[in-house]
C-alpha cells in the first residue's frame, strides 16, 4: 500500500524519471469531429473551448518555452511533459501530426509527451505514427471515455460507443503505448452504481493511468443551460469523495491515478463551487480512505468480462 493509499502521478514520475516532472499544456489548433460537423456541430454538453483553459498561443516551441519558464520558476530542475491538451490531438493529417509532435519533443527539457484524443480518432496511420513516436520518447495517449454506459453517452452527446473505446484501447495496447483513461463522476442521470461500474470495468483492462474528474458546469455550455433550468444537480463534495474513494478500491494497484478531481477555469465555473479548492478535495479523499481503511486495489478482482 502506498503512503497516500493510491498510486499518485508524482510517485510514478519519480520512479520513471528520477525527478519531479510537470506537464506543459499545448493548444495545437486541432478541431474535434464532434464540433466540426463530421459527427456533429454540438459537441459534448459540458465542453467549453476544448479543455484548453491553460493553454496559450503561438507555435508549439513558443508555447513550450513559456510553459517551461513558468514551471521552472517554482521547480528549476523539473522535467517537462509536452501535453497536447486542447480538443482532439490526433485529428489531423498524419504529416501535420508528425510535424507538431516532432517540434515538441525537440525542445529543451522535454522528457515525455502526452496526447489527449478521442477513441474514434485513431486510424491505422495515426497508430503507426504514435508507435514510432513511443520508440523515441515516453508517450502517453489520453483517451476521453468519461463513462462506459452508452445511455449516458447519448445524454452527454459524446458521439461514439463504448465498443469504439475498447477497439482503440486494444489497438494502443497491442503497440505497447501507455494509455491513460479519463472518467467523469456526476454525469447526468448516473447513480453511484453506474460510476462504480465504470471504474470496475475499466479496472479489468489494467489501464496504465486513470484521470478521475468531477463534472463541472461551465459558462456557455449546453450543460449550463440544463443546470439553469433545473435539469441537472451537481454532486456535493461528500458524495464525490465517497464515490471516488470507492472507485480507487476497484482499480488495480498498478494503475497510476493521474488526477482525483478536475479543475475548470475559475472565471467560467458556475457549479459546484466547492470544487475550486482542489487540495481540499484531494485531502478529503485521502482522509476518507484512511477512515474506512481502504486503498487503491482493495476491492479489485480480475474477472472474466
Image (tube, rainbow, N blue to C red):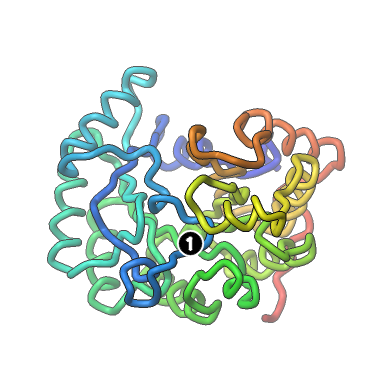
Residue drawn at the location 17% of the way across and 36% of the way down: 62
| Residue 44 on image: x %, y % | 49, 63
Q: Return the residue nearer the eye: 33 or 197.
A: 33
Residue drawn at the location 31% of the way across and 24% of the way down: 70
| Residue 143 on image: x %, y % | 45, 62
Examine the rendering and report whether any part of residue 260 can be seen: yes
Q: Which quadrant is home to the C terminus? A: bottom right
Residue drawn at the location 74% of the way across and 67% of the way down: 194
Q: Is residue 72 above or below residue 26?
A: above
Examine the rendering and report whether any part of residue 297 can be seen: no
Q: Is residue 86 above or below residue 4?
A: below
Lateral position of residue 91 relative to residue 290, left or right: left
Q: Is residue 213 above or below residue 57?
A: below
Lateral position of residue 103 relative to residue 45, left or right: left
Q: Return the residue nearer the eye: 148 or 215.
A: 215
Outermost residue to the front: 229
| Residue 108 on image: x %, y % | 18, 34
| Residue 17 on image: x %, y % | 38, 38
Lateral position of residue 199 relative to residue 258, left or right: right
Lateral position of residue 196 relative to residue 78, left or right: right
Q: Residues within 10 Å of mark 1 (few under 14, many from 20)?
A: some
Image-quadrant location for residue 288 = top right
Residue carrying label 1: 144
Q: Return the residue nearer the eye: 195 or 54.
A: 54
Amino acid at each position: 500500500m502506498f503512503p497516500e493509499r493510491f498510486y499518485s502521478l508524482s510517485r510514478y514520475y519519480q520512479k520513471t524519471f528520477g525527478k519531479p516532472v510537470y506537464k506543459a499544456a499545448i493548444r495545437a489548433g486541432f478541431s474535434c469531429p464532434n464540433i466540426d460537423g463530421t459527427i456533429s456541430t454540438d459537441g459534448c454538453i459540458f465542453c467549453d473551448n476544448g479543455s484548453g483553459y491553460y493553454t496559450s498561443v503561438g507555435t508549439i516551441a513558443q508555447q513550450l518555452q513559456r510553459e517551461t519558464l513558468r514551471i521552472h520558476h517554482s521547480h528549476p530542475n523539473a522535467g517537462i511533459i509536452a501535453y497536447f491538451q486542447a480538443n482532439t490531438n490526433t485529428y489531423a493529417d498524419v504529416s501535420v501530426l508528425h510535424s507538431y509532435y516532432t517540434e515538441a519533443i525537440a525542445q529543451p527539457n522535454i522528457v515525455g509527451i502526452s496526447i489527449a484524443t478521442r477513441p474514434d480518432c485513431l486510424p491505422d496511420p495515426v497508430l503507426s505514427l504514435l508507435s514510432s513516436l513511443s520508440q523515441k520518447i515516453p508517450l502517453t495517449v489520453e483517451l476521453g471515455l468519461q463513462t462506459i454506459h452508452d445511455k449516458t453517452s447519448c445524454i452527454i452527446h459524446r458521439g461514439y460507443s463504448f465498443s469504439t473505446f475498447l477497439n482503440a484501447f486494444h489497438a494502443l495496447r497491442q503497440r505497447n503505448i501507455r494509455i491513460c483513461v479519463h472518467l467523469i463522476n456526476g454525469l447526468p442521470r448516473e447513480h453511484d452504481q453506474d460510476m462504480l461500474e465504470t471504474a470496475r470495468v475499466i479496472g479489468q483492462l489494467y489501464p496504465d493511468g486513470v484521470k478521475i474528474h468531477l463534472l463541472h458546469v461551465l459558462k456557455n455550455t449546453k450543460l449550463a443551460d440544463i443546470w439553469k433550468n433545473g435539469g441537472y444537480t451537481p454532486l456535493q463534495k461528500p458524495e464525490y469523495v465517497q464515490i471516488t474513494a470507492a472507485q480507487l478500491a476497484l482499480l488495480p494497484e498498478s494503475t497510476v491515478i493521474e488526477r482525483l478531481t478536475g479543475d475548470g477555469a475559475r472565471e467560467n465555473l458556475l457549479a459546484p463551487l466547492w470544487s475550486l479548492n482542489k487540495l481540499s478535495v484531494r485531502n478529503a479523499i485521502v482522509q476518507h480512505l484512511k477512515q474506512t481503511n481502504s486503498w487503491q486495489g482493495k476491492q479489485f478482482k480480475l474477472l472474466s468480462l
